[in-house]
Image (spheres, rainbow, N blue to C red):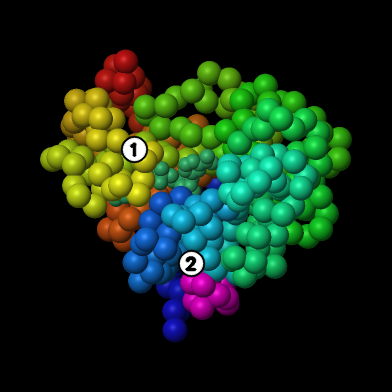
Amino acid sequence: MYQASENRYEKMLYRRVGQSGLKLSALSLGFWHNFGDVDDIANQRAIMHHAFDSGITHFDLANNYGPPAGSAESSFGRIINEDFKAYRDELIISSKAGFSMWEGPYGKGGSKKSIIASCNQSLERMQLDYLDIFYHHCPDSETILEETAHALDLLVRQGKALYIGISNYSPEQTQAITEYFKAWQTPFIIHQPQYNMFNRKIETALLDVLAQQGLGAIVFSPLAQGLLSNRYLNGIPKDSRAHRSDSPFLSEDQVDATIAKIRQLNGLAQGRQQSLAQMALAWNLRNPTVASVLVGASKVSQLEDNLKALNNLEFTEVELDLINQILK
Ligand SMILES: NC(=O)c1ccc[n+]([C@@H]2O[C@H](COP(=O)([O-])OP(=O)(O)OC[C@H]3O[C@@H](n4cnc5c(N)ncnc54)[C@H](OP(=O)(O)O)[C@@H]3O)[C@@H](O)[C@H]2O)c1
């Protein structure tokens, strides 16, 4: 029987999401990889226990996480119901719909049909009554924004989601959908974009739009899927994402193309008495609009490493300049 650590709230920081009343742990745990049927359930359980014991209150899922698609939500549902029932009110659980999930015209996109059906499926797989945050996972050029916004608003009114988020929307799309949510007083509070040292696109306009609208960001792949850590410093391990055949999202070529910069960044991190992963996460958190960094972990030891990022979140101007020079 799992009993959460009594000290779980002692070390974590909790940061407000935009101007909403919701705070998220500065580190959140993502279930995109490492929680499918192909992954060891005992390891999944250990990672979830360690995360919650360390003050991570937010678990992020999506309909299609696995593989196979849906299996991350099913495993999560099993563990949540077996181990975390007593802690439901201490947890922020999110899911998403938008990418391809089931056969036929309603298995993806942003129509009312797709979003409502997908949310119902997610609740069933996770054996939950409601989600804390429900996201539209990616913009859908075939559905007008008003319909997608209406479907998300309906989920809140049906009691299936407390807050609404969007992911992978451009600054312009974000601005446009915000107008609907404002008019309907929908609790739309959060955007989930990719952000890391190798992908700084959100710095050009999105972060400004979010700040102006009182919205917060939770950023995904803050370690560029593991590149910004010690994972690849001495070659490409057999169990790594870059090598695993069930993950097509990070290639060995991407490791080869970035390893020189990774080594330079690692040297800088060592000078700060941090691991590279810790420095990369701290760097992502330097903007107050970023409420939380959404990390993945295939091992408890990675999570332990990442959590220590909170020991040093400060950067000198000299360090920031050096990082900019390395990333050029
Ligand atoms: N909204 C979207 O479209 C979208 C897209 C992608 C992700 N996400 C969300 O963001 C979450 C995180 O994404 P991500 O998994 O790409 O994040 P990430 O934190 O950039 O990468 C996680 C991977 O990095 C490696 N790693 C993590 N910590 C490490 C450490 N301390 N030392 C060495 N290696 C370490 C592990 O790779 P190995 O597996 O090689 O051990 C781990 O699986 C996802 O789970 C999901 O919830 C959302």
Q: Quadrant of residue 197?
A: top left
Q: Is residue 242 left or right of residue 126?
A: left
Determine the residue located farthest toward the left in the rendered image.
234
Q: Is residue 93 left or right of residue 325?
A: right
Residue 82 inside the magenta-drawn segment: yes
Which residue corresponds to the image point at 36% horizontal and 62% vertical from the top-left?
A: 39
Q: Which residue is mark 2?
A: 75
Mark 1 residue type: Leu
Secondary structure found at label 1: loop
Task: Tell whether label 1 touches label 2 (CB within 8 Å).
Answer: no
Decide: few, some or many residues near mark 2? Use Cα within 10 Å; few <14, some 14-19, many ≥20: many
Near-viewer residue (140 or 190): 140
The spot of residue 321 in percent (x, y) is 32, 19
- Quadrant the C terminus occupies: top left
Instruction: Determine which of the numbered discs, if any, sits on residue 169 in the image.
Output: none
Secondary structure found at label 2: helix
Q: Which residue is mark 1?
A: 250
Magenta range: 78-87
Mark 2 residue type: Ser
Decide: few, some or many residues near mark 1? Use Cα within 10 Å; few <14, some 14-19, many ≥20: some
Q: Is residue 46 visible?
A: no
Determine the residue located farthest toward the bottom in the rendered image.
1
The answer for how far apart the CA atoms under marks 2 and 1 are is 24 Å
Q: Quadrant of residue 8?
A: bottom left
Figure check: 251 above or below 158: above
Figure check: 232 above or below 145: below
Figure check: 208 above or below 53: above
